[in-house]
Amino acid sequence: MQTIHPHTRRNIVFLSLDFVMFSIGFAFFDPTVLVPAFAKELSGSSFLVGALAGVRVLMVTLPQIVAASVLLNSARKKPLLALSSLGGRLPVLFLAIAVLFWSQSRPGLVIGALVLAIGLFFISEGLNGISWPDLVGKVIPAGIRGRFLGFGQLGSSLFAMGAGWGVKRILGEGGLAFPQNWALLFALAFVFLMLSLVAILLVYEEPDPVEKQPTRLWRAIRLLARHVRDDIKLRRLVILQIVLGIASTISPFVVVRARELLARGDDALALFLVMQNLGGVAAAISCGYLIDHVSSRAAIRVNVLLQIVAWPVC
């Protein structure tokens, strides 16, 4: 019989809140929809849009090796998750302040703040991409993990769709003028992202018995390279992640172009956010079922197939 963690209910509640608060905050700071549109409006530069997309891919991927090597010797997963979240989300507040006060007088300073905020946010998310699933795997029993992730994705996507309506009110006709509109969006992103961090801090985690060993990053990198070389399944997954990451860098240009072509381009941004999260609702229902009743591999294959089908439409 499966052993149920004594604090499972508490952890489900706070991890679900983390799920929802993060998704709302992320909707106000979406790197494939809102950030490219703001970068283009501020600078008029397509190069900046592409550079930010490249920064996002690199900063998400590279820190994961560091996270894995640190967590290997850690009795708790939550400290790294909390610290990296704080370090990645505080710059969003500084960005909101810079946008409000210096967008028109010192746009170069705001561009620097934007690049810094994006870089630190996605370094944080790269670290969290290891520590958050590690924490969930530790405190949520395997038998309900798929349903938890599915319902979490469902709830967070529904709330994030509401954030898309908020984006329409702020950026659309009758909303605030530039730069107050963008400053408000980034400030809202910061508030909800920090509420997500509070929820993380309230998760209960018992320490694991670990044998402390020196953390050797280069040893971890060499070990990873060896595993990729020797394990064909792992090699396929790494290649898949790289290919999907490269493909995702095109999304910001699609958004920017749509905003320029459509008569009410700001409404299109909100529509992108709503449709993106509507897809999240569908994914939550289907992938949660597949993970629990078929396999995680089936859910991954469905996800990849849908992305392959979507790109020719663009």
Image (spheres, rainbow, N blue to C red):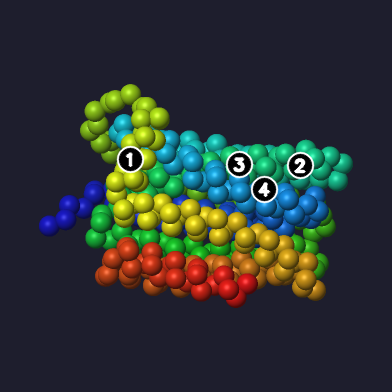
The x, y position of residue 68, in whole percent, is 37, 39
Whether residues under marks 3 and 1 lie with C-beta atoms below 8 angstroms apart, the answer is no
Whether residues under marks 4 and 2 lie with C-beta atoms below 8 angstroms apart, the answer is no
Q: Which residue is mark 4?
A: 51
Going by the picture, which residue comes out furthest to the left?
Answer: 1
Q: Earlier in the sequence, mark 3 or mark 4?
A: 4
Distance, label 3 to label 4, CA atoms, is: 11 Å
Report the amino acid beneath label 1: Arg
Screen quadrant of the N terminus: bottom left
Distance, label 4 to label 2, CA atoms, is: 15 Å
Q: Which element is circle 4 on?
A: helix
Residue 110: give its label: 2
Q: Which element is circle 2 on?
A: helix
Report the amino acid beneath label 2: Val
Report the amino acid beneath label 3: Gly
The quarter of the displayed image where residue 214 is located: top left
Q: Which element is circle 1 on?
A: helix
Q: Earlier in the sequence, mark 2 or mark 1?
A: 2
Going by the picture, which residue comes out furthest to the right?
Answer: 105
Tell which tag, 1 or 4, sits nearer the viewer.
1
Residue 202: give its label: none
Residue 226: give its label: 1
Q: Which element is circle 3 on?
A: helix
Tell which tag, 2 or 1, sits nearer the viewer.
1
Q: Which residue is mark 3?
A: 119
